Amino acid sequence: MTAGSTSGLEWKEGDVPVSLRFDDPYFSLGNGLAETRHVFLGGNDLPARFRDGFGIAELGFGTGLNMLATWIALRDHGFQGEMNYTSFEGYPLEAEEIDRALRAFPEAHAVAAPFLEQWAAGARVITLPGLRAEIVIGDVRETLPAWSGRADAWYLDGFSPAKNPEMWGADLMAEVGAHTAPGGSFATYTAAGHVRRALGEAGFAVERAPGFGYKRHMSRGVRS
């Protein structure tokens, strides 16, 4: 466990942060950046859908790896304009912890300095070229219903449903649906049946798709 850590971490395989609260790693013990690209970007048909004003929302900010992967995709796609990124996080990490975790992914760490500088200074609205990110801190069961926005794409990246069931309850998935623009999408690494059913009840046409690495399936869907 990191000395002085307020977020309750231990480190596995050198620089993989594991939540002591949920006994679950913040990203794949294999290649978290590749998993982000497969599940969240690919699962939402991104970057093909990027446009000015496009909105991404996320359950579980963690190390910010998904945000940085999205920003890299914006840059590589030659995106012109500004996108909005809103992430809901109950237990924010310290900048030093995020920096250590991101060192496992040199491509992401190489572009992380502007984010880390703002985060260390206490900013929770992060401005990067082409991307404005707001990280909403608190219990998502309270903060998401109070959010006035609607997303074009959701990254559902809470800890495992088996370890953190409150993040995947039917009421919260209904809020995800209510805060999704028509034709908006979601993607998640989990294929748990109760999560898929809850998202179907929230208005999404849900399908299973090939998962990343050892995970046979993931879930994705579009709201009609």
Image (cartoon, rainbow, N blue to C red):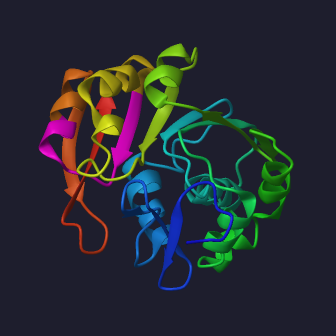
Q: Is residue 55 above or below residue 91?
A: above
Q: Is residue 194 magenta?
A: yes
Q: Is residue 224 something one can see in this rendering?
A: no
- Of 143 and 64, nearer the camera is 143
- Of 115 and 73, nearer the camera is 115
Q: Is residue 176 something one can see in this rendering?
A: yes
Q: Answer with left or right where residue 1 lies relative to residue 23.
A: right
Q: Is residue 195 magenta?
A: yes
- Of 32 and 34, nearer the camera is 32
The residue positioned 60% from the left and 76% from the top of the image is 105
Point out the residue furthest to the bottom here. 13
Query: Could you say where residue 176 lies in the image, as x and y percent from the top left?
Result: 39, 26
The residue positioned 61% from the left and 55% from the top of the image is 64
Magenta segment boundaries in residue numbering: 184-196
Query: Could you say where residue 11 lies in the image, as x and y percent from the top left?
Result: 51, 76
Query: Could you say where residue 62 lies in the image, as x and y percent from the top left?
Result: 55, 53
Q: Answer with left or right where residue 175 lies relative to residue 48.
A: left
The residue positioned 43% from the left and 61% from the top of the image is 20
